[in-house]
Amino acid sequence: MRERLTAALVKGLAPGERLVEVCDTEVPGLSVVVSPGGSKTFFFRYRERESRSMRRYKIGRADVLTVYQARARAQELRAEVAAGSDPQQERAATRAGCLEDYLDGPYTEKVAHLKSHDAIIATLRRDFAEFLNQPLSAITTWKLEKWRRARLEKKKSTASCNRPLAYLAAMMNHAQKAGLVKVNPCTGIKPLREDKSRVRFLSPEERGRLLAVLEAREAQARAARISHNKWLAERGIAPRPTLDGRYSDHVFPLVLLAVNTGLRRGELFGLTWGDVDFPRRMLRVKADSAKSGKTRYIPLNSPAMDALDTWRAQHDAVAPSALIFPGRGGGRLNNINKAWKAVRDAAKLDGFHFHDLRHTFASELIMRGVSLSVIRDLLGHSNFTMTQRYAHLSPEVAAAAVAKLDDIGHELAVEEAQESAG
């Protein structure tokens, strides 16, 4: 039934055996519904933009709101729908709070069991900082595509676009199942094609530059500490401890261990002194730190052993459970991005990432004739496909491939001999 809603009309509506609905002729979408029990409620009907299905939004009870107030609210809702919003989703998102609230609350609990939960939450907070104060439903496909275009214009890698979006897609799936958003805005965004065959490793010259920069960094740190302590003494302030050890901080030994063991950054951060068997020169990567979820053992060469021995000697008490490379306050180290970038830039290692130290370890082994199966076990690859990226570096493989050309010369010689005989 369609009528112009008035206070008198609403008051005079009687309940029936089923719901009775009267649609307002002044504001399209506004109606009052009378339940069989006699309660009267104002609703706003609209067509959802993506699915084109009809939805109904509860404005409020007719014994609380006037017709004028219901009509004014319906006009606001019409404007929101025309602008592309979904009032139902906005209401659900308001109950859930903004993206930041959802990350810090329900989703943190959801991913708490994952080894990478800290990294996932940190990535979402960092890369989607512009959306943190927005309701979940306000994060649309269009906004995310715009976000990705902006990152690509800043020369960000395809991986730095794909990975955060994958994390966000998983989070939005969780929110969708909880009824907080109707549509996952990441669903319509196809991942960018990545070159997963990339293998960047240090050349001998680059390796020399890297070590030289790390040595210079140590010297600069000591000089800076001496200068600072002199400044403090002149003002009657107690000096800071002198940097008497081989390493001023964790960066140098961390890099040495990475390039000589092939461990991932997260695996290095999770190492404890109990994971090092000094007499047997063996390093254990525990299952809870390994990406594959399996414990593996890495033999330690002389540079790795020297780095660990020296670093251990600089610590007064080294408990088996203590982290080898702790962060501030003794907790787990989160990243070394700032320090690594400074070292990389000083060494002029263009396009070189910390993870490429792992590639360097594998590449140097295979170029020295180590089999792919051994390298797979050392790197902790769950399948052989990842290890095969290094196959082209094997001198045996290359030699065997080129040796096949010998047959061409032999075949030509045979043909010439036959022609001469004929």
Image (cartoon, rainbow, N blue to C red):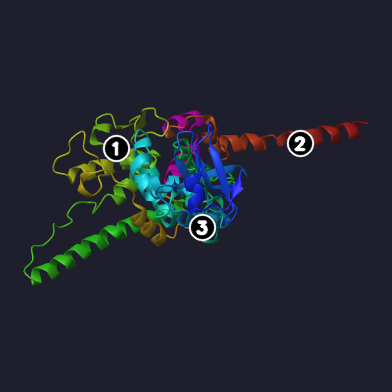
Q: Is residue 344 above or below residue 187?
A: below
Q: Of the residues shown, which amino acid type is indicated by label 3?
A: Arg
Mark pair 2, 1: CA separation: 54 Å
* Residue 223: x %, y % from top left: 22, 64
Specify the segment rendered in magenta: 357-378
Sequence-wise, the earlier of marks 2 and 1 is: 1
Residue type, label 1: Leu
First-in-chain label (2 vs 3): 3
Q: What residue is at 29 percent from the left and 39 percent from the top?
A: 305
The reply to whether residue 111 is in sight is no
Residue 341 circle label: none
Residue extending furthest toward the left: 236
Q: Secondary structure at mark 2?
A: helix
**Helix, strand, or loop for circle 1?**
loop
The x and y percentages for residue 2 are 61, 48
Please report whichever mark, 3 or 1, sits nearer to the chain's N-terminal start. Answer: 3
- Secondary structure, magenta segment, majority class: helix
Residue depicted at x 56% and y 58% = 83
Which residue position is annotated with label 2? 408
**Does the segment drawn in magenta span residue 362?**
yes
Within-10-Å neighbours for mark 3: few <14, some 14–19, many 20+: some
Question: Residues under labels 3 and 1: Cα distance?
Answer: 34 Å
* Quadrant of the rendered image containing residue 272: top left
Identify the image quadrant of the N terminus: top right
Is residue 328 or residue 107 the one in the foreground?
107
Q: Residue at x 48, y 36 (%)?
A: 35
Q: CA distance from mark 2 to mark 3?
A: 51 Å
Tell me if residue 227 can be seen: yes
* For discs 2 and 1, the disc positioned in front in the rendered view: 1
Q: Which residue is mark 3?
A: 151
Q: Nearer the viewer, mark 2 or mark 3?
A: 3
Q: Which residue is mark 1?
A: 271
